[in-house]
Image (cartoon, helix red, strand yellow):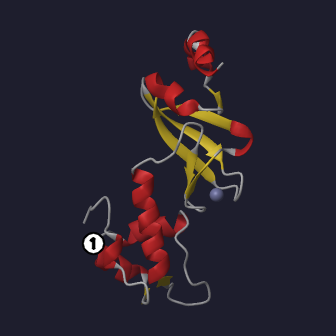
Amino acid sequence: MGKRHPNPRLAKIHRNYTVEEVASLLSVHKNTVREWIRRGLPIIDDKRPMLILGRDLVAFLQAKRVKNKQPCKPGEMYCFRCKAPKTPAENMVDYEPQTETLGNLFGICPDCETGMNRRVSLPKLDQVRGKMDITFPQRLQRLVDSNQPTVNSDFR
Ligand SMILES: [Zn+2]
């Protein structure tokens, strides 16, 4: 239990797996597998019980690993469904603070309209901002505005 980064190589691409089989194969909880399905792990629709193609499982786990390495360039967020970094639709992003210095950026994938998020550190926000137009909660706006001159000088 509790392996954070299951090894994609454990799955065989020519096999099909039930949720239970995936759970025991990768030593994760069944609910974790169901969560993956909600987040875009494909299942074979017309079968009961639900079956997952080994090939899809491998691809999903590999994408998960890539995501953990945060390959996104400035201005990009990772789309789970497209399995690729994307520039959010209209470059519109919301910042949701979690602590004083940490938060999440939320945007929409321009290709599949899935919600995307990216974890960021507020002091390092300018390194990931790119062309994103970030909306901050009211109480943070003043703080951010005071940083604006620095931001602009970096990009113009
Ligand atoms: Zn997408």
Q: Residue at x 42, y 74 (%)?
A: 58
Helix, strand or loop under label 1? loop
Residue found at x 48% / y 33%: 103
Using a 10 Å C-alpha cutoff, classify the residue at mark 1 as few (fewer than 14 neighbours), some (14 to 19) or many (20 or more): few
Q: Quadrant of residue 117?
A: top right
Left or right of residue 113: residue 57: left
Q: Is ligand 1 less than 8 Å from the beta carbon at label 1?
A: no
**To which residue does mark 1 refer?**
27
| Front residue of 53 and 150 | 150
- Residue 1: x %, y % from top left: 24, 66
Ligand 1 placement by image quarter: bottom right
Residue 76 or 112: which is nearer the viewer? 76
In the displayed structure image, the side of residue 31 where residue 118 appears, left or right: right
Whole-percent x, y for residue 112 in the image: 69, 59
User: With 20 as the anchor, is 134 left or right in this view?
Assistant: right
In the image, residue 85 above or below residue 75 = below
> Where does the image place residue 64, in percent across and percent down from the top left?
43, 60
Where's the C terminus, which quadrant?
Answer: top right
Residue occupying image coordinates x 64% and y 43%: 107
Judge whether 48 appears above or below 141 on screen.
Answer: below
Please state if 38 lies on the left or on the right of 11 as rendered: right
In the depicted structure, whether residue 153 falls above or below residue 78: above
Residue 134 picture location, percent across and down? 64, 29
Residue 123 placement: quadrant = top left
The amino acid at mark 1 is Ser
